[in-house]
Image (tube, rainbow, N blue to C red):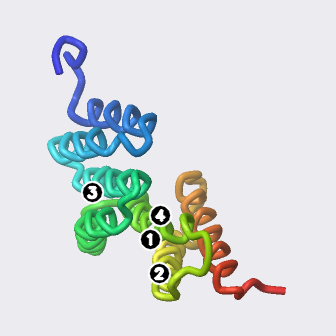
């Protein structure tokens, strides 16, 4: 934070931090947290929650899906309340729901054999929640369409583990 940040808004700095975090994979969690704080300072609580949820997801990638699930629970509950009050948009809400679904899918992705049916049920429920939110509302928004496609892929993966594939 110095001369390089001169003239940048909190939102600009948040977007830069998130971009950097995305390139770091599992080591990007602290930058996502920094971005969350900057989004909050910029008056965008929905984007702040989305950044916190992304931090939780990259922590799951680092090998702590249980801790990540606990970490994403707060942003998940908060975004649902904020969205219900029309305090944030569909895109931010979908981002948090997708991050939670990704966290819940980590044990499924990492499994070498059978997966606990409760784990599969939680992952399926989270993917269906994303679809219920964005279904039929993607329009021209490629990010929402991508969320929908990813949720459908998650459902297919869960079905493959349960042996519940069609035809």
Marks 2 and 4: which is nearer the front? Answer: 2
Badge 1 vs badge 2, beta-carbon distance below 8 Å? yes
- First in residue order: circle 3 vs circle 2: 3
Could you say where residue 41 lies in the image, as x and y percent from the top left?
Answer: 15, 42
Q: Circle 1 sits in a helix, a strand or a loop, which is it?
A: helix
Task: Using residue 34 as the reference point, say whether residue 152 is left or right of it.
Answer: right
- First in residue order: circle 2 vs circle 4: 4
Question: Which is nearer the eye, 85 or 20?
Answer: 20
Could you say where residue 80 lies in the image, as x and y percent from the top left?
Answer: 30, 72
Q: Circle 3 sits in a helix, a strand or a loop, which is it?
A: helix
Is 2 placed above or below 151 here? above
Question: Which is nearer the eye, 76 or 105?
Answer: 105
Can residue 63 be seen in the rendering of this structure? yes
Q: Residues within 10 Å of mark 2 (few under 14, many from 20)?
A: some
- First in residue order: circle 3 vs circle 4: 3
Q: Residues within 10 Å of mark 3 (few under 14, many from 20)?
A: many
Could you say where residue 75 lies in the image, as x and y percent from the top left?
Answer: 26, 64
Residue indicated by mark 2: 119
Q: Quadrant of residue 19?
A: top left
On residue 104, the disc is 1
- Gap in Å between the C-alphas at discs 2 and 4? 12 Å
Q: Residues within 10 Å of mark 4 (few under 14, many from 20)?
A: many
Q: Where is the N terminus found, in terms of image quarters?
A: top left
Badge 3 vs badge 1, beta-carbon distance below 8 Å? no
For image coordinates 48% across by 65% down, the residue present is: 106
Badge 1 vs badge 4, beta-carbon distance below 8 Å? yes
Can residue 86 be seen in the rendering of this structure? no
- Gap in Å between the C-alphas at discs 1 and 2? 7 Å
Spot the residue most to the top: 3
Task: Using residue 2 as the reference point, say whether residue 56 is left or right of it.
Answer: right
Is 110 placed above or below 27 here? below
């Amino acid at each position: 934070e110095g001369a390089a940040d001169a003239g940048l808004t909190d939102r600009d700095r948040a977007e830069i931090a998130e971009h950097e975090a995305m390139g770091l994979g599992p080591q990007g969690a602290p930058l996502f947290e920094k971005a969350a704080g900057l989004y909050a300072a910029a008056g965008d609580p929905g984007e702040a929650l989305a950044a916190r949820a992304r931090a939780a997801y990259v922590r799951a990638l680092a090998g702590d899906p249980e801790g990540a699930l606990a970490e994403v629970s707060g942003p998940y509950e908060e975004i649902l309340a904020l969205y219900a009050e029309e305090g944030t948009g569909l895109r931010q809400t979908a981002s948090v729901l997708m991050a939670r679904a990704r966290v819940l899918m980590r044990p499924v992705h990492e499994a070498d054999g059978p997966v606990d049916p409760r784990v599969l049920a939680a992952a399926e429920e989270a993917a269906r929640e994303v679809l219920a939110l964005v279904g039929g509302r993607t329009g021209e928004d490629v990010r929402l369409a991508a969320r929908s496609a990813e949720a459908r892929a998650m459902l297919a993966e869960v079905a493959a583990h349960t042996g519940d594939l069609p035809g």
